[in-house]
């Protein structure tokens, strides 16, 4: 074969190879996070892009003192918090009267009490309508406290009253202020203490994602007591 033909053939082969699209590299799908002990499904609000941590704030992957943060969405499965003597509450977001699981991002907070012998109580509805997601904290005296997003996009909370931790005795909803971004709810820390999620210093805390693109935190002033007026 002449030199000119060889050159022409090599050019044709090179052009044919260049025309073949490269195979797309398959991006491995990240495995779902393992649910810590005592949690059926642990979900988080979509992780926003944070160029830098705001002053005084801690990221979700910070080990101390908060640990990771969780939130219970309208389509989550039951979330279990450990109560005294083996009693547990299963929390979920339901429709207006808690007869059915909710199918959108607004609904009522509902729970069932589960006895050590495996008996469910009647479903309890905490009243009001909340949005996007909520979370539950365990106070130093083993009472539970619920944090949610209200219609005005502020944080509201409700807590157990009385001495019987199994009783369905709750305060009224109270606002803790703040302004939560659309599509986000309230997130509670795990405090690195699964399954109880109880802070070592006894001070509950929570965080919200604000319209300014930052996390904002609030914490109790005293165990099972009042809350800070300011946000960090």
Image (cartoon, rainbow, N blue to C red):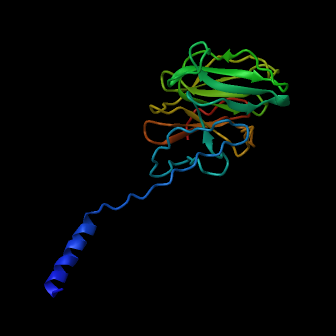
Front residue of 79/151: it is 79
Q: Position of residue 1 (x, y in %)?
A: 18, 86
Q: State left or right for residue 35 relative to residue 5.
A: right
Looking at the picture, tell me which residue is in the foreground, 51 or 81: 81
Residue 105 is left or right of residue 11, and the answer is right
* Occupied quadrant, residue 226: top right
In the image, residue 64 above or below residue 140: below
Task: Farthest residue to the front: give it.
Answer: 1
The C terminus lies in which quarter of the figure? top right
Left or right, 1 with respect to 223, comes to left
Q: Quadrant of residue 70?
A: top right
Q: Nearer the viewer, residue 149 or 98?
A: 98
Q: Locate residue 229: give its quadrant.
A: top right
Q: Residue at x 48, y 30 (%)?
A: 179
- Extreme residue in the top direction: 97
**Which residue is at 62% across, 14% downward?**
99
Q: Tell me which residue sits at (74%, 17%) in the image.
A: 168
Q: Position of residue 67 (x, y in %)?
A: 65, 46
| Residue at the left extreme, as displayed | 4
Q: Position of residue 177 (x, y in %)?
A: 54, 27
Instruction: Name above or below for residue 133 compared with residue 173.
Output: below
Q: Is residue 209 above or below residue 123?
A: below
Q: Position of residue 5 (x, y in %)?
A: 15, 81
- Residue placed most toward the observer, 219 or 135: 135
**What residue sits 49% from the left and 21% below the top?**
151
Number of labels in the image equals 0
């Amino acid at each position: 074969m002449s030199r000119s033909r060889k050159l022409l053939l090599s050019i044709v082969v090179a052009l044919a190879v260049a025309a073949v699209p490269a195979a797309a590299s398959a991006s491995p799908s990240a495995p779902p996070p393992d649910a810590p002990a005592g949690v059926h499904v642990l979900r988080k609000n979509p992780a926003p892009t944070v160029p830098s941590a705001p002053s005084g704030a801690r990221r979700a992957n910070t080990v101390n003192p908060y640990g990771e943060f969780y939130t219970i969405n309208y389509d989550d499965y039951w979330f279990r918090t450990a109560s005294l003597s083996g009693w547990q509450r299963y929390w979920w977001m339901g429709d207006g009267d808690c007869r059915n699981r909710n199918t959108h991002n607004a609904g009522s907070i509902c729970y069932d009490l589960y006895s050590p012998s495996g008996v469910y109580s009647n479903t309890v509805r905490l009243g009001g309508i909340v949005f996007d997601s909520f979370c539950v904290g365990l106070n130093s005296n083993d009472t539970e406290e619920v944090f949610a997003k209200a219609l005005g996009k502020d944080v509201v909370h409700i807590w157990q009253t009385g001495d019987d931790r199994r009783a369905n005795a709750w305060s009224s909803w109270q606002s803790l202020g703040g302004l939560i971004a659309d599509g986000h709810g309230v997130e509670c820390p795990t405090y690195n203490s699964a399954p109880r999620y109880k802070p070592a210093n006894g001070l509950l805390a929570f965080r919200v994602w604000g319209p300014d693109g930052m996390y904002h935190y609030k914490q109790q002033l005293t165990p099972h007591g009042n809350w800070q007026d300011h946000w960090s």
